């Protein structure tokens, strides 16, 4: 199923269904938790976070959803679990083994396409490719599959031990905990790196890239600058196109957090030049948020417009981790700059709705518990 949160549409096998906002949110929540029985109270808490609806509200929305999804039944249907609530059932089709999977060159070509989508921030296309892997003849390795699930807004699986070992899930748990409680996360991150706990792919991601933003949030700006300079030099030396605008954004973020006002214009110009050459949607979204934070100091109206454009781009890209990072950057820097009043309150509320929708609030205590259990005594 392909989701468009802006148009409130869901598409499956070329057929599109248009939903109302709450219908869309309800179906997406059921989809993320497909196969699980959810009580009316759970659905109310997840979908109607700002109101005071009653159980009948859920029943009415399920009734309307069933009518709109009737064309896909019984492959996709909402079952009533009498006396408890509802469950979304997704029937798996058995099409037989795809002979294309036996052609290494074809599989490698598709992986190359996936990598291109990833670099350009086309999460919508990447998700479509991954969801149709059996039809297309594309094998998804476990690491990539976990990333896909996070991109879809499913974070609840991260605390389920049956989904994989702690080591397999550790990077994602550290990433989430950085959003939940960044200061306490520092100890866990440093221990994971010191003891080489993570698989090489995730260790390198954490040690060379993610750590830079983490250090900035922790207030270790000079240490972050040293690592950033090292990363930028390596990116330029190896011509890693996918990271060129990313590192330019990190440089802009650094000068904003360090309040080096005389360097901001040059940093903004550098990002804009790189985005012309490498028009990656995720980096464009992050850039507009960063620029908006700077502009807000002298022109709040224009600053907010840039921030809204940035958030819209991140939502369109369907990279949930980057949307989370965008909001987190916005809130931490605006707090540093002393924002107050209604503007910051609006984004605080949006952040609360987003984290509740994808399940961060539900699993936050379990995230910390597992990190403490596995890393606390190292």
Image (cartoon, grey):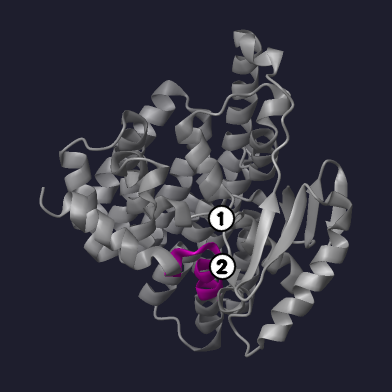
Q: Quadrant of residue 231?
A: top left
Q: Quadrant of residue 232?
A: top left
Residue beneath disc 2: 357
Q: CA distance from mark 1 to mark 2?
A: 8 Å
Most distant residue in the left direction: 377
Q: Is residue 260 visible to the viewer in this orientation of the structure?
A: no
Figure check: 352 above or below 150 = below
Figure check: 149 above or below 44 = above
Most distant residue in the front direction: 82
Q: Which mark is residue 153?
A: 1
In percent of the image, x 68 and y 27: which residue is there?
134
Q: Position of residue 10 (x, y in %)?
A: 78, 54
Q: Is residue 98 visible to the viewer in this orientation of the structure?
A: yes
In percent of the image, x 54 and y 46: which residue is there?
149
149 vs 338, left or right, is right
Specify whether residue 206 is painted magenta.
Answer: no
Look at the numbered disc 1 and give the secondary structure of its residue.
loop
Q: Position of residue 41 (x, y in %)?
A: 57, 79
Please state the extent of the stretch shown in magenta in the rendering. 350-361
Give the mark nearer the N terminus: 1 vs 2.
1
Figure check: 352 above or below 229 = below
Q: Position of residue 101 (x, y in %)?
A: 64, 15
Contact (Cβ within 8 Å) of mark 1 with mark 2:
yes
């Amino acid at each position: 199923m392909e989701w468009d949160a802006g148009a409130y549409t869901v598409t499956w096998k070329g057929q599109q269904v248009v939903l109302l906002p709450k219908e869309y949110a309800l179906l997406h929540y059921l989809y993320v938790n497909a196969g699980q029985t959810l009580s009316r109270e759970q659905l109310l808490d997840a979908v109607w976070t700002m109101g005071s609806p009653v159980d009948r509200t859920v029943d009415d929305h399920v009734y309307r959803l069933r009518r709109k999804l009737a064309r896909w039944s019984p492959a996709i249907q909402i079952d009533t679990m009498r006396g408890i609530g509802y469950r979304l059932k997704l029937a798996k089709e058995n099409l037989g083994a795809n002979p294309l999977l036996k052609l290494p060159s074809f599989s490698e070509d598709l992986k190359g396409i996936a990598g291109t989508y990833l670099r350009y921030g086309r999460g919508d296309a990447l998700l479509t490719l991954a969801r149709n892997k059996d039809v297309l003849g594309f094998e998804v390795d476990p690491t990539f599959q976990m990333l896909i699930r996070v991109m879809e807004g499913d974070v609840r699986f991260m605390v389920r031990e049956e989904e994989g070992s702690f080591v397999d899930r550790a990077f994602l748990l550290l990433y989430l905990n950085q959003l939940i409680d960044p200061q306490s996360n520092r100890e866990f991150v440093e221990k994971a790196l010191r003891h080489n706990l993570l698989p090489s792919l995730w260790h390198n991601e954490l040690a060379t890239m993610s750590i830079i933003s983490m250090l900035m949030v922790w207030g270790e700006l000079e240490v972050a600058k040293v690592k950033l300079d090292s990363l930028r030099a390596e990116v330029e030396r190896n011509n890693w196109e996918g990271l060129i605008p990313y590192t330019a954004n990190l440089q802009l973020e650094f000068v904003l957090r360090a309040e080096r006002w005389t360097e901001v214009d040059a940093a903004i110009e550098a990002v804009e030049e790189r985005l012309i050459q490498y028009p990656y949607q995720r980096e464009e979204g992050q850039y507009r948020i960063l620029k908006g934070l700077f502009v807000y100091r002298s022109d709040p109206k224009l600053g907010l417009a840039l921030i809204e454009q940035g958030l819209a781009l991140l939502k369109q890209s369907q990279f949930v981790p980057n949307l989370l990072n965008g909001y987190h950057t916005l809130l931490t820097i605006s707090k540093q700059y002393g924002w107050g009043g209604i503007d910051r309150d609006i984004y605080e509320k949006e952040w609360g709705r987003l984290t509740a929708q994808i399940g961060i609030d539900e699993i936050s205590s379990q995230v910390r518990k597992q990190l403490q259990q596995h890393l606390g005594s190292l």
